[in-house]
Amino acid sequence: MNKFHLSRYLLLFFLFPISIFSQEYVDIIKVGYGTTFNSSFENSPHSTDVKNFDFGLTYPIVLNEKSALITGANFNLSNLQLAPTSEYSNQYSTTLKIGLTSTFNEKLKGTFVLLPKVASDYNSISSNDFYFGAFATMKYKKNEHLSYKFGFYTSSEAFGIFATPIFGIYYKSPNQLLEIDASLPIVADINYSLGKTIIGFDYFGIGRSYKIHQDNLPIVYVEQTPLEFSSYVQFNTFNEAVLLRAKLGYTTNEHEVYAENDQLDFRVSAFSFGDDRTQLNPNLSGSLFLKFEAIYRFHIKEKEAK
């Protein structure tokens, strides 16, 4: 049985460094906290708020003129009700990042990163809560303003195996005011500089799964795939090293619960194969969300010049 999930076509995944070295900077630390308001359960008068906390660390270690080791970690916490009468529950995901980026010539760069993670409610961690992912990307520099990106991502998840191709661009206008950074179907950002203030629009497709260990109840898992679209205002401080961002947007709010062994065969991008699962909770409606982010950014070109 094949299912085409249109809402998942633009999804996925962590805050992993898919854009690292695509632009003239690296975001070393990124912290975010957001709240989704009054997401209604289908066929129910009840609703829930969804709170999210994200922390990402990416630390490149230069090996030589052409190569750098990528290290870091991501942490995510989601808090919400999974059913109209249930208690609020926490879902955690901790991902390690280790990989390599290399410059092959003045036009071509490649990145390969391994992404082992633990994802559950952390009430009772077992080997079944460990998952493994990896991605590889190539960047082709067409000129000093435009680069193309392409690659592939795959991961084991609670629902089965997931894989997707990656296509994107990075563009910085000659006057340095307009920036476009997209790695679809995962992330996209378009922003315009007004000096120390930046206005922008971004998209983030989150795809995560978590095991839920409940006392005296069978183990289940949550497939969390909300798609976020937002506009933001960003303030650059400390010589553009610290960025403060306020975002207002809309999320589709998909948090589906399934029995532990109720899995699909595999999923390639938007296409699911062998998906005859039975969802155990009602769907959540999409809603508005508010989010605040703080970023520590390292500017590569400025450092090279010094």
Image: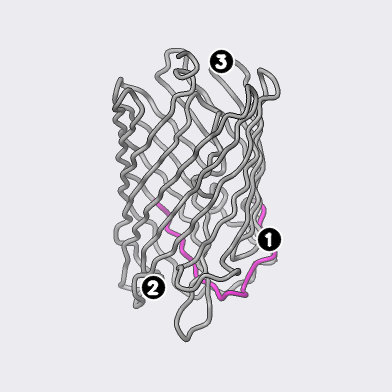
Secondary structure beneath label 1 = strand
Foreground tag (1 vs 2): 1
Foreground tag (1 vs 3): 3
Q: Magenta segment range?
A: 251-268
Disc number for residue 139: none
Q: What residue sits right under mark 1 in the picture?
A: 266
Q: Position of residue 241 (x, y in %)?
A: 36, 28
Residue 157 position by quadrant? bottom right
Q: Residues within 10 Å of mark 3 (few under 14, many from 20)?
A: few
Q: Is residue 52 left or right of residue 165?
A: left
Q: Is residue 107 left or right of residue 237?
A: right
Q: Earlier in the sequence, mark 2 or mark 3?
A: 2
Q: What residue sits right under mark 3 in the picture?
A: 144
- Quarter of the image that includes the N terminus: bottom right
Type of amino acid under label 2: Asn
Q: Residues within 10 Å of mark 1 (few under 14, many from 20)?
A: some
